[in-house]
Structure formats: C-alpha cells, structure tokens
Amino acid sequence: TAAAMATAASAAAVLLGRRGARAGAVGGARSASQSFTARPVSTVDAPAAAEAAKKEDFKYKISLEELVSLCKRRGFVFQSGEIYGGFNGFFDYGPLGVELKNNLKKMWWRRMVHGKDNVVGVDAAIITNPRVHQASGHVDNFSDPMVDCTKSKKRFRADQLMWAKVELEDGTLLGAVSMLDDGNTEQQLMKAAKKLLKDKGAAEGAALKPLVVKDMTEATPEEIPLVPSPANGEPGHLTGARSFNLMFNTNIGPYDDSSSVSYLRPETAQGIFVNFKNVATVSRMKVPFGVAQIGKAFRNEITPRQFLFRSREFEQMEIEYFIDPKDDYKQVQEEWIMEMWNFLKAVGLREELLGRVIHQGDKLAHYARACTDIVFRYPFGEQELLGVAARGEYDLQQHTKASGETLDYQVPGEKTRFVPHVIEPSLGVDRLFLALMCSAYDEDEVGGEARSVLRFPACVAPITLGVMPLLKNQEAHVKKAKELANLCRRRGFNVFYDESGSIGRRYRRMDEVGTPFCCCIDFDTIENGTVTIRYRDDPLKVVDRMKIEDIPAFLDKQCELDMV
C-alpha cells in the first residue's frame, strides 16, 4: 500500500542515518536550475564570494576515467584480481600507491595523536564479539534502501537512483526519466526528458513542466512502474525500495551455524567505545581526551562505483573525542572541523575544492546531535570526504545497557561521575587518497615541452628524492649516486635511483609520479662533493650547490608537516 511504502521510505532514511548522512549524494553535486525543483538535502555553509568564484573557475585537466588509467599505469592502484576479470568494489594499491597511502596515514597520526597531549591510539580487531554490533544497532539497522531490476537482475541503491516525471504544461503525462546520481544529474535528466518529448511525437512548441527530481525511496507504488531501469532504459521492471543490510557475515570456528556468526566491522568506532574504560584507566587521561584509530572496515555496497570513492573494503582514520556533557559541544565540534580542514590543506588538497555541508532534520543519524561534513569537488561532483559528528552519549550508553558494564568516567579526586559525550572526526583514507590524486594532477610546460606532473607535498610524496648519475658508464658517478641514495634511505626517506635514459627523460618520469626533488651526480660532484637540487615545481630554478652530507637535513626540513 501507499502507506506501507511511505513507512518503508521513512525507515530507509533513518537507516541511512546509521552510516552518517550523505554529503550531497543526491543534491550536493547539483547546480541551481530554474527547470528543476531540487529536493533539499542539507544546509550548505556558503564560502566567501572570492572563494566561491575561485572554486567556480577551477577546471580539472583530467577526467575520472583518465585518472583511473594513470593510477594503473604508474603503479598507484590496480583492480583487485584483475587477471580474473577484477572484483567489483575491491582495489589493490601498487608500489607507489601504498607509499602515498602510508604517508597519508603517517601524517594524520603525527598531527592527530603525536601532535596532541590528550589523544592516544588503539588498534582494535576487525572481527569482534557479535554482541558489539548488536548493541550498536548495526545488526538490525545498518542498511541501505535497494531496488532490483527484474529483467537485467541488477541492483541499485534506491537513494542514488534519481528520476522525474515528464509532463506537459497541459498535464499530459509522457512517462519518466531516470539515471544514477552523478555531478550533472539535473542536466542529464532534462536532456533525457527532451528526448522523450521528441520520441512521443508531442506537438511542436509543447512545453514541459519543471522536473521534480526525486530518488526511488520517494516513489509511490503508482509511480514505480513509470520509472525506467538504468540497466535497459525500460519502465516496468524496477521493484520498490527495500532494506539491504551492509555488513559482511562470517563464521568463527569449525561450525557453520547461527552460534558461530560474526561480522567484519562496518566502522572502526565501536572498537574504541568498548575499550573506553581500559584506555581511560591505563593512559590516565582526563576528560576531554581522544582515542584515535586507523583501520580497515567493510561494507557490502549495493552498487560500488566512482573508483575508490565507494568501495566494499576501505580504511578509516577516526577519533572519538570524549567531553564533559556540560561542555559546549558545538564549540568543540567546530574546533575539530577546523583542525581537519587544516590537515587536508597540509597534505595537499586544494582549498578551493573543499566545502562544508551541515546536516539537519532527518538527515542526521538518530544518535547525532549535529553533523558537519567537509566535502570535496571530485571530477564526478561534490561528495563527502569526512564528517565531524556530535554523537552525544549514545554509543557508551548502548554498550552499558547491553554488557552490564558501566562505561562512565570519574573525575580524578572527586566523587563526580558522568558518561562522556563524543565528538567524532571520521575520515576515509581511500577517499582522501582519491581527493589528493585529483588535487595534485597538473599539466604545464618546461622549456617549451609539455609535461604531466603530480604536485604532492613533500611530506606525503611516495618518492621523496630521485637520485641519478649523469652518466651510467662513469663508475665514479654511479658509486657516488648510490652512496647518496643509501645515506638518505638510512634517514628514512624513500629514494628512487635511476640511471636509465637521458637526464631529461628521468626528470620527467619523476615529475609524473610526484617526486618533489631530484639530485644529479655530475663531474662537479666528483670534484667537490656537491650536488644541485632540482625542484619539481620550479625545475628551471637556479640554486646553489649543496654538500651531499647536507641533503638529509634539507629533506627533513622540506618534509615537515604543517601542524597549524
């Protein structure tokens, strides 16, 4: 019935809240258009006029498809199991990708944990007692709304399958158009509507009503048969929205029955909450304090897409920051938003591609008092990069009720006890990796020759220094180059030694993978033990020669992470 469908749609919206409200996955990537009535998703915190203009002026020099190709060609990311045709939603990081990813995690840990007096770390198990997920609500509620195409047998996330009725101004219904949400949804739906108008042979000059764009969770039973399937473009084959639990089941031990069922964790946060009392006791931390974790999480996404952005296996960097319930949680949340914003800039994201989305109403998770996302403008549209949520005391209270163990905090030297409230900054490593690749890619000319370059900051670049003998047939050049490479490696830098091809070609290879500095061992090096540093971002810059023994100190200085 219509009432049942409305109830299901409402439930689906709440269930989505378990995952954190989406940062404009339906509306955030859209531009305003008089031809559309956009469905409100959240409140966007508009940037200053100058920043908005700068953001609008930015144009990508690479498409998502080209970026995927570059990642494979240069050894950043491969499709998992590629020789067997791949495996949808899973990716393998190659030699350069794993270096970049590890550096991003290292910088996050350096700033968020080592850089603060009141944050410590944990590394919780991926598989834990299934009662943890039962108490947190994941077993019953961690779901996405899904629709099936009965003809193609494909499945789609209902909240990402966008559609609109196509009607003439006189009320004549021509049908409906649909597509999976992307950064250009309204324009594509309008284009499809005009094609449908032509195909239906409407009278010349017939005017269309403005399109009202919805997703499939909002479709009534009467409207569902009108919506064409994205798989084949034919109406009448889509089912209504239903819930699909996103957790991966597994069995523990030798028996395959209900008593052995557990789950791959869908988020890292619960491992922190159940260890709250252990950490508070052994670390002797006083509220406010934070517990950080970097780790894998798994979600059985209905339609993984957009490369690394939405995958089934991913990595999270999260902090649960525990505060006194009497504290101003809005102020603490804002401080963490700015801290995460500044971290993103420090590791190389372009600020003009960043924005904020504030979730309100039914777009908030049921446990959240407030949530703000920092969004990034990818080539496929503006999407959530990280979220900073005020989770209240929900999680600690849930585990207290389910376990019988009181997860509260006693103020040292006082009788005062309380259950702390939580501010949670949560960042996906893979989404950050993709955003950095998008930010770093550039094309320019050096000496009249075109080049492609990845402008990674030195602190996260997969290769810090390229070392090259000018002539590989000169034994002295080769020996000195290898000595320099080993000297820098002993100091912890990833160095790439290259003696193949012309020196110009070797420089270009380093530019293409984002190496910030290169050293060429030449005849002067043999005579006086000095080298010239070649800068990736200013390759024609003339600099004084530097003693070989001073190179590690120079790299140390260049690779410092901005902690402000």
Image (cartoon, grey):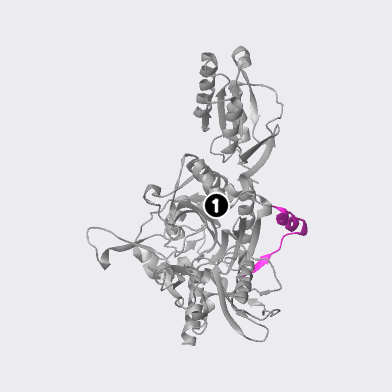
Compared with residue 262, is residue 95 higher up or lower down, i.e. above or below?
A: above
Instruction: Classify residue 251 by image quadrant.
Output: bottom left
Instruction: Name the residue at the right extreme.
Output: 50
SS for dot 1: helix
* Residue identifier under label 1: 65
On screen, 462 above or below 373? above
Name the one closer to the observer, 300 or 38. 38
Q: Nearer the viewer, residue 462 or 137?
A: 462
Pick out the residue farthest to the top.
527
Q: Is residue 424 above or below residue 135?
A: above
Farthest residue in the left direction? Answer: 254
Q: Is residue 345 left or right of residue 133?
A: right
Could you say where residue 218 lies in the image, as x and y percent from the top left? 54, 78
Q: Residue at x 61, y 56 (%)?
A: 376
Q: Which amino acid type is marked by label 1?
A: Glu
Q: Is residue 80 left or right of residue 103?
A: left
Q: Which residues are magenta?
A: 41-58
Task: Residue 386: give x, y in percent of width and height.
Answer: 57, 58
